[in-house]
Amino acid sequence: MIYQYIEDKNVTPEMDEKLRGLLSASFLNRNDSEIFSRQRFLKEMPQHRYLFWDDETLIAHIAVHDKQVMIDEVSYPVCGIAEVCVHADYRKQGLVKKLLNHVHQDGLASGYAFSILFGDENVYGSSGYQHADNLKLFGLTKEWVSLDNLLMLALNKQWPEQEVRLSGIPF
């Protein structure tokens, strides 16, 4: 098994095809398979990709978006975790946890304040993610709303008690 970090801008056409294949196969139940058959992102192109390979087979993937949160009108950089998936034949081996460790190490080294993802705390809690009632996203209702599946991990800054607003397109 080989670990790889790559900036999305350096993805080759061959790698793009493998990414779309893994993403399409992994997100069948969310009706996202059609989108992933055409592009390697759901809503917005990420800046970073973390991968595991078994020879020529892409077996695990995490996309990371460079995002910002606002706390008391001060902006802080965050890792926006998206499109987390593992090839069906390689699940239950801790690959996501290993990839997240790489993301967290890079985030710490790069000065990111937090890592944020949309997911299940029962799944991501073992990697340190927890629900934060004060994390708000600008919703379809044109208001700042809290979502049950929005999770955070503090990296270089302690998570505050006051409202935290996630800026930009949801990932």
Image (cartoon, rainbow, N blue to C red):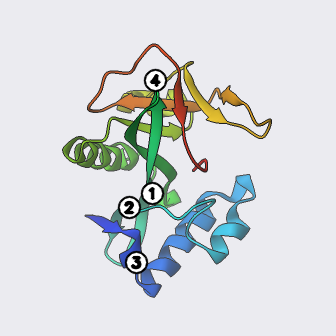
Cβ–Cβ under 8 Å for marks 2 and 1: yes
Which x, y percent locates residue 24? 62, 67
From this view, report whether residue 118 is shown above or below residue 31.
above
- Comparing 147 with 88, the one in front is 147
Q: Which mark is residue 11?
A: 3
Q: Which one is earlier in the sequence, the residue at label 2 or at label 1? A: 2
Image quadrant for the N terminus? Answer: bottom left
Reading the chain from its start, which is encountered first: label 2 or label 3? 3
Q: Secondary structure at mark 1?
A: strand
Badge 2 marks a residue whose secondary structure is strand
Q: Secondary structure at mark 3?
A: loop
The residue singled out by tag 4 in the image is 72
Q: CA distance from mark 3 to mark 1?
A: 12 Å
Q: Residues within 10 Å of mark 2 (few under 14, many from 20)?
A: many
Residue 140 has which mark? Answer: none
Q: What type is the residue that disc 1 sits on?
A: Ala
Q: Nearer the viewer, mark 4 or mark 3?
A: 4
Residue 31 vs 68, above or below: the answer is below
Residue underneath mark 2: 48
Give the farthest residue toward the top: 161
Which residue lies at the image location 36% right of the left edge and 44% below the top edge? 94
Identify residue for label 1. 63
Q: Earlier in the sequence, mark 2 or mark 4?
A: 2
In the picture, measured across the screen, residue 117 lies left or right of residue 93, that is right
